[in-house]
Image (spheres, rainbow, N blue to C red):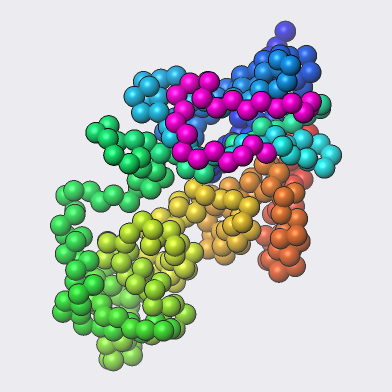
Amino acid sequence: MSTDHSAYRVDTTSRLAQWRIDNFASCTYRKSDPFKMGLWNWHLSVEKNRGLFVRLYPEHSNLTRDNPPIASFTVRLVSSVGDRKALVHPEIIDKRLKNNDDCIWGIEVPLTGRFIIEVEFLDLKTAPPEGGEPCSIWAEGFTQQQSNAKALASLGRMLMESIHTDIVINASDGSMGAHRAVLAARSPVFHGMFSHNLKEKELSTIDISDMPIEVCQAFLCYIYGNIQHEEFLSHRLALLRAADKYDISDLKEACHESLLQDIDKKNVLERLQNASLYQLPKLKTSCLRYLVKFGKIYDIRDDFNAFLQCADRDLIAEVFNEVLSVWKGF
């Protein structure tokens, strides 16, 4: 007798995990295959015993034993047929999870037919071995290498203290100084401005009228290598536009990778449009999967209807092709 391996598979995207239960009527217990989220492999399990019990826990390993995840997440049970009614567990914040007894959700409402167990990870943290406040694993990518720290700090000082600046950048609501050599080294567009007899070279100014001074500062801080993580997160979409305009490929890729990490119902349509506009294939695929395969299109019907009124026709066609491909799978 063959085993349907898809019955144990958990689908993941960005920070979302979904386990589809198509037939649980004849079972009393089922445990999912491991799925990756953050640094850890995880399991979901569901058990019938005078009620329904759902568990979420990291797979037993040396990493889990020595550095267990401190997780913030929401859990939902969604009917995968009909009007997709959902049961929602209250949001869990900063809970340390080491074994399968640390997160148990008891449900008294009987479930019939097919349903989906959905976990949305809001944050995952680890505690430093030497003690101290736990740190988010999704904020670790911006620590600078020690070998470059002094050089980057010096470049940052040149910008922030206006040390020997030789060009002025006029944003929409303010101005700040910068250095031609640094800008030219980081952007072929700036290099072209300073290499030809354009007004930027003659007047020693660059007008960026479509960028507020706050975004301009974040943009220059990235170019000079001293942007802060929070500053980057606050201005990702504006930085993406700047990276595309001034042909700074590493900034564009940094924005692309960051925007993949926290797709949710509030931002998925905006990110889908930006993914199409700036040709970000991974972001587009993740947004389409989130909307269609993970069923979030049903949760934002009003916003999606408004999106259909103004979105590019080719992008709308891609959304409906994704819908059709998912329907074919049922």
Give the residue at x 30% y 67%: 221
Q: Position of residue 184 (x, y in %)?
A: 27, 73
Q: Position of residue 262 (x, y in %)?
A: 52, 49
Q: Is residue 290 magenta?
A: no
* Residue 225 is at least partly visible in this image: yes
- How many numbered marks appear? 0
Give the extent of the magenta segment: 88-111
Seen as rendered, the residue at the extreme right is: 82
Give the residue at x 51% y 25%: 102
Q: Position of residue 223 (x, y in %)?
A: 30, 66
Give the residue at x 45% y 51%: 257
* Residue 191, image quadrant: bottom left
Give the residue at x 46% y 28%: 97
Q: Is residue 74 left or right of residue 241?
A: right
Q: Position of residue 107 (x, y in %)?
A: 70, 27
- In the picture, the quarter occupied by the N terminus is top right
* Residue 5 is at least partly visible in this image: no
Q: Is residue 313 above or below residue 262?
A: below
- In the picture, the quarter occupied by the C terminus is top right
